[in-house]
Image (tube, coloured by chain):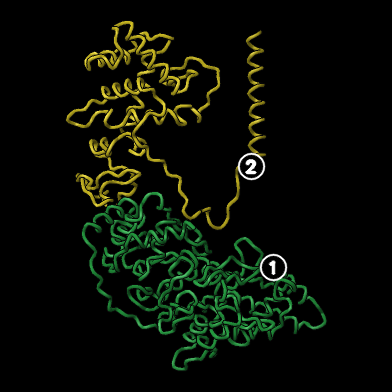
Chain colours: A yellow, B green
Amino acid sequence: MSYRSSVRLNRRHFLSSVAIFLAAGTSASFARSISGSLPWQALASDPPIQVVPGGWYFFTPQEAATVEAIVDRIIPADELSIGGKEAGCAVYIDRQLTGPFGSSSRLYTKGPFLPGLPTQGYQGEANPAQRYRAGLAAMDAFLKQRDGKSFVELQPAEQDAFLTEMEAGKIALPNGIKSAGFFGLVLQNTMEGFFADPIYGGNKDMVSWRMIGFPGARYDYRDHVTKHNEPYPQSPVSISGRPEWLGKGI
Amino acid sequence: MRALLLTIAVVSAGIAAPAIAADQADTIIRGQYQSVLGDCSGCHTRPGGKPLAGGLPLQTPFGVLIPPNITPDAETGVGKWNATDFHNMMKTGIGHDGVRLYPAMPYPAYTKMNDQDISDLWAYLTTVEPVSNKVEANQLPFPLNIRLAMSGWNLLNFDATPFEQDSSKSTEWNRGAYIVQGAGHCGTCHTPKSFLGADKNSAFLKGASLQGWFAPDITGSMTSGIGRWTEDELIAYLKTGVNKHSIASGPMAEAIENSTSQMTDPDLKAVAVYLKSFASDTAAVQSVKPDEKRMAAGEAVYRDNCSACHGGSGGGAGPLFPALAGNSLVAQDSVETLVRLVLEGSQAVHTKGAPTTPAMPSLAWRLNDEQIADVLTYVRSAWGNNAAAVSSGDVTSVRGNLAQ
């Protein structure tokens, strides 16, 4: 009985929200008719702002050191490329956490907070900025208790072992933080920093693009589509350009 | 237009003198067409404003002039003028009450119009909706603001010779010459000016700078002019704003929208016949090849910013993206328009024949002055183009003017 009434209530709730949404939609009149030329303005642009390394906008120095150490284990310097730290992955994450990503400002962030399916990703209340702050503190609290050291004081092999256990969800971090979930977040953001356009702070000198042969911010290959089994001759280009624009080759 | 048609309908419906009424309607309609040929609204109508009630300020090398209200409003327009006043003004630049006009009003061209066309135009202007809008046309600094000074200017520069038919040429050619030199006042923008602001008739239609744009050479030159355009391509450009060589931008886009796209097909043909009759010079000046480092930098900038639309070899893409190889706008002596297009971007004019309005984005945020100079240097020298290199100072000065 109570189940039924709650369903009915929910449905009424839902229908009335839809009604409110529709009413708001029609009265706000975002739609407009355009005839003749399409709207266009001289000098129009909304470019991303070049991230300049130096200083931390979100992380404390301690947090920054931990994140730099993590990204350098996820992407270690080797014969393929420089490491995640030198590539600027920590700078990328720092700047992202101060922006709309860090505060989830473009996501629905009200409850209910229910455990989701694995395919649904993180379903909790905390935004990424809060998750980094709590997750990094929990990692160091855990390691201090277990090994008497913080993450940055561990040897690289020990760091790898710890991160591997985190990824497998075998570490019981304090305050109910899921180690696999937090590791997944850092891994995701590290890859973004490494592969995103250098304008966002990572992927220094387009290192990852040079490594995998990605041509960058280009959008026309008509001169090359018929040239099968030939490498694409142009070096990658960032939103902010490439060294060749300054008359420099690499 | 609706008011006009209504007037005609009402007048035609009158019983008293239908013949005279019909004549008036014809006169007014002919006069309206003269206003299309003369592109009155190009200057005298503010974008989005009431027709002919006064335009946007014109930046001349001598100072600012504001095109006045030419609706029949008695206080702020030309309501107190009569047909003779108007005729004198068009022929001599001296308006009602002896007020001397500045030649930003192209009376040096309109003086070529015949009496019939001028009186038709006046008949039309008297039917326009009167709008009360006070315009202080003269914003020039002292001493140029003294209108009497223009009597001296006229003595030195003004040639009141009416249009003369050239009997050795076809009727069509003569009609084209009459439109281009007279009502169409093409030379007002496209003919270089002397230091006094008068047309240098020895360089008729050779291209000139005005209002932050360079109105290109439209003579028969194979490099900088329209020598490579066929008559049909020229007609398509004037009618739709686009042909395979070029897409109109800036003030020409406005002239096409308000004037040439509304000209009749026979008149467009006549204009094309006349303009194509100019001698084509093929002796291209061999400019010094720019240094290789700048060409390499320019090519890299071109490849990453321009080639997706304009093609890896400057071939463009049909009517949507103009070819840059062999493009006469690219080869002008002045790079003012080129730099401006790269900085500001541009949108094709919307006409009935070409409604798509493809646009070029602004690159001012992405490229610095050096890079723009390099890419334009490359474009002006690559694929058979052969125009002088561009300095970053050229770009800096255009960027500075746009920022104002």
Protein chain holding label 1: B
Pick out the residue farthest to the front. Answer: B142
Screen quadrant of the N terminus of chain B: bottom right
Task: Locate residue A92, reporting x and y percent.
Answer: 36, 31
- CA–CA distance in space, label 2 to label 1: 37 Å
Q: Chain of mark 2?
A: A
Label at residue A22: none
At a point 32% along the width and 62% down the height, the residue shown is: B391
Mark 2 residue crowding within 10 angstroms, few (<14) / some (14–19) / many (20+): few
Same chain shared by disc 2 and disc 1: no
Q: Position of residue B238 (x, y in %)?
A: 48, 71
Residue at (45% x, 69% y) in the render: B237
Residue in the image at 46% along x and 53% along y: A43
Residue B237 is at least partly visible in this image: yes
Q: Between B108 and B236, which is closer to the camera in this rendering?
A: B108
Q: Nearer the viewer, mark 2 or mark 1?
A: 1
SS under mark 1 = loop
User: In the picture shown, does residue A166 fall above or below B22?
Assistant: above
Give the percent coordinates (x, y) of residue B19: 75, 84
Residue placed under numbered mark 1 in the picture: B134
Residue drawn at (47%, 94%) of the image: B167
Q: Is residue B37 visible?
A: no
- Indicate the position of residue B358 as horizontal and vertical percent values: 45, 56
- Amino acid on which disc 2 is placed: Ser
Q: Which residue of the protein is positioned furthest toward the top in this rendering?
A: A146
Disc 2 secondary structure class: loop
Residue under pointer 2:
A29
The image quarter containing residue B272 is bottom left
- Given the image, on which type of amino acid does mark 1 rest? Lys
- Name above or below for residue A131 compared with residue A214: above
